[in-house]
Amino acid sequence: MQSIVEETSEQALFRQTVRRFVEDELRPRAREFDAAGRIDKRLFQKMGDLGMLGLRYSPEYGGAGLDWSYTAVMYEELGRADNAGVTMGISVHTDMATPSLAEFGSESLKQRFLVPAIAGEQVSAIAVTEPDAGSDVAGIKTRAVRDGDEWVINGSKIYITNAATADWLCLLAVTDPDAGHGGFSQIIVPTDSPGFRYELLDKIGNWGSDTGQLFFDDVRVPIDHTIGEIGRGFHQQMMQFQDERLVGCVSSLSGSEHLWEETRRWTEERVLFGKPLAKMQNTQFKMVELWTRITAAKALVRACVDQRVAARDATDLITMAKLFCGRVSRQVADECIQLHGGYGYMKESMAGRAFVDSRLISIGGGSDETMLHYMARQLGF
Ligand SMILES: Cc1cc2nc3c(=O)[nH]c(=O)nc-3n(C[C@H](O)[C@H](O)[C@H](O)COP(=O)(O)OP(=O)(O)OC[C@H]3O[C@@H](n4cnc5c(N)ncnc54)[C@H](O)[C@@H]3O)c2cc1C
């Protein structure tokens, strides 16, 4: 495995901790998680105890105060857990639903929601997508109306990861329909609030995670559950998406590399026409092509991580990396399933699962077309 980061001895030590967690707690139970169709909440408690849930967050709130390179190390290892759904559920909690709270949340909000999230006592989810608005984030309709010291929330969200597991949601809602991009706010909604309910959805892949539709029927939360300023939610969510996308790049790429290694092993063992599949030129050429793509994607992701470590804006690079990693993951899965023949089509094979799991990367967290649309504008088209 070629690491995305140039590793220091501290990072190597941290990698060992994550690897042990993956080997002891995740990989042996990977198929059990698939069958359950939802993430085991106790995993968060264990990860909290190991200090894995707040790597970049301030020690004041229980975090480790480390830079982005440690997040990269962690997701390189979690990407090899043999269960993309579980890795996704964990990453939603660590890097998709909590960054805004850590960056913009009030002191009391951080004490009430970030501290237990980092400790693994509470699980979070990010609720942006709606039945009638996904790529068009500004088209969401879920409405929070002020009533004294409370928001009254009505609407629905769809395809939400950790729907059944989450203790609270980082919700993006419309708070002023006449204010354009300034009319949205991020609000923390505890999932035990009266008027909230969810229904689980049946996915074609990523079986180890619970994905659902959320319903808000006059859900009341205090106004001080707003993350940052009222009306800044759209901008804050756009910033939060950057961590989401980069974590997705790291874990998907690492999963692709893991699949490549497994496929190599398979082609060395599988004998056809009197010789191992790996000795056929077609196999070697395909494997080299895939390795080249993985290596190129890693270079791009490394550049993103370096920018994040240096606290520079990496939006353009992350956008291109999200697009590229999604495509590389799909190509790797497609070629690897082919090299496995019929076994690749079995649910138990890593290639078969990767084939459906990797399809999500070009859709979730902003689709390929959303990345293309953004970059076309950046390039002046
Ligand atoms: C398993 C899973 C987990 C998810 N988890 C979460 C979660 O935790 N929280 C959350 O908020 N959301 C989540 N999502 C939702 C995900 O982010 C959205 O599905 C995604 O943003 C796309 O939105 P959409 O599904 O509404 O598709 P649409 O926006 O309806 O897109 C339909 C098609 O139009 C294309 N398109 C988009 N923009 C353009 C354009 N400018 N030009 C041309 N074509 C375009 C799209 O790429 C796509 O091909 C999850 C989705 C899945 C499947």
Image: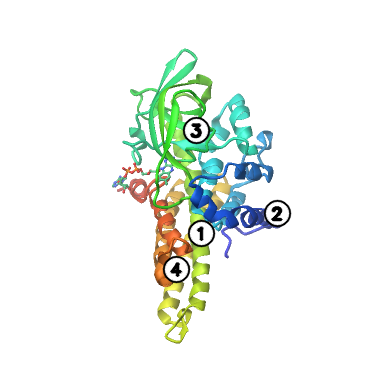
- Based on the displayed image, in which of its 4 quarters is residue 107 positioned? top right
* Rendered view: 189 above or below 356: above
Judging by the rendered image, the residue that carries numbered circle 2 is 10
User: Marks 2 and 3, how far apart in space?
Assistant: 33 Å
Mark 3 lies on residue: 169
- What residue sits right under mark 4 in the picture? 290
Answer whether residue 247 is visible to the viewer in this image: no
From the image, which quarter does the N terminus lie in? bottom right
Identify which residue, 355 or 107, lies in the foreground. Answer: 355
Q: Amino acid at mark 3?
A: Leu
Q: Are marks 2 and 1 in contact (CB under 8 Å)?
A: no
Q: CA distance from mark 3 to mark 1?
A: 27 Å
Residue count near mark 1 (Cα–Cα under 10 Å), binned few <14, some 14–19, many ≥20: many
Disc on the earlier residue, 2 or 3: 2
**Which is more N-terminal, label 4 or label 2?**
2
Please tell me which of labels 4 and 1 falls first in the chain. 1
Compared across the picture, whether 377 is left or right of 19 comes to left
In the rendered view, how is the structure colored? rainbow
Q: CA distance from mark 2 to mark 4?
A: 31 Å
Disc 4 is placed on an element classified as helix
Q: Nearer the viewer, mark 2 or mark 3?
A: 3
Give the side of residue 119 with respect to residue 136, left or right: right
Q: Which residue is mark 1?
A: 255
**Residue type, numbered disc 1:** Gly
Residue 134 image point, x, y percent: 35, 40
